Image (cartoon, rainbow, N blue to C red):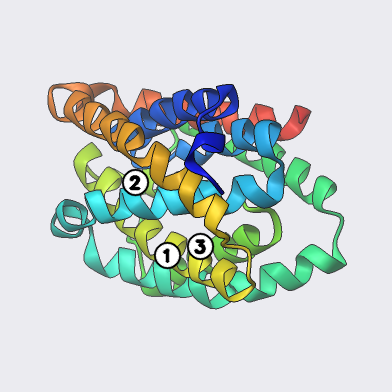
Amino acid sequence: MPLAELFDLDLLAAAIAAVIGGWILGFTGFGAALVMTPAFTLLWGATVAVPTCLILLVIANAQLFLPAIRACEPKTTAVLSLAACATIPLGSYLLLAVDRSSMQRAIGAIVLLLTLALAAGFRHRGARTVPLSAGIGAVSGVLNGATGMGGPPVILYLLAGDDPAARVRATLLAYYAVVNTVSLIALGIAGLLTWPILARALVMAPLYMIGIWVGARFFHRGGQDAYRRWALAILFAIAIATLVA
């Protein structure tokens, strides 16, 4: 694709979505895809939107992974990530066998109820055991493969505990670094990574990374106190969007 064809109003709109998504990711450790995937799909269609979004997410992982891995809960991160990667293929199989729309709405309803419970003060007081973390990771992997919405179980699991905001954010960033990279490799094997898609992602990457940097600065400059409220608000938006989309 000639570079001149890339720079149009669609790309400008996508870049604005990428900046907003980058800010959300830099602050909370998740949520960028909530903004970018619908916007990219509207502009370019799903077969372009999903891999473009994943490329940007993996770029973010490279930018944030080292600080995250130093601050995360390593055991929980490893168990969640490995279990999710192991069950993504099962989710892909279910995508062919189960009605995706019905599954997404069921997920949205569950996420909404759990988000309201957390907002009301619910906490998981027990230990994060290996079997429990593996189970949450496995569910997340299945949902990621089946619907592309694998994040909420892990996010809710981490928010339900009493860990500091910085550790929750770092654990999410490290988890997504692994899962997004595996998902991108799978798309590459499937032949869905084309040069036009790579070109779009690389053109938007600098603005996206600026958004991440601004979000991270906001978090480190006092946003930690508001982290939980922001995270629950984004989960609430995910649930509502899934129910009405």
Disc 3: which residue = 136
Q: Amino acid at mark 3?
A: Ile
Q: Amino acid at mark 2?
A: Gly
Between 202 and 186, the one lying in front of the other is: 202
Q: Amino acid at mark 1?
A: Thr
In the rendered image, residue 244, in percent from the top left (x then y), is placed at 77, 27
**Which is more N-terminal, label 1 or label 3?**
3
**Which is more N-terminal, label 2 or label 1?**
2
Mark 1: secondary structure: helix
Q: Which dot marks residue 161?
A: 2
The residue that appears at 36% across and 37% down in the rendered structure is: 25
Determine the CA span between mark 1 and mark 2. Answer: 27 Å
Mark 2: secondary structure: loop
In the rendered image, residue 22, in percent from the top left (x then y), is placed at 37, 34
Q: Which dot marks residue 74?
A: none
In the picture, measured across the screen, residue 170 lies left or right of residue 182, that is left
Disc 1: which residue = 181
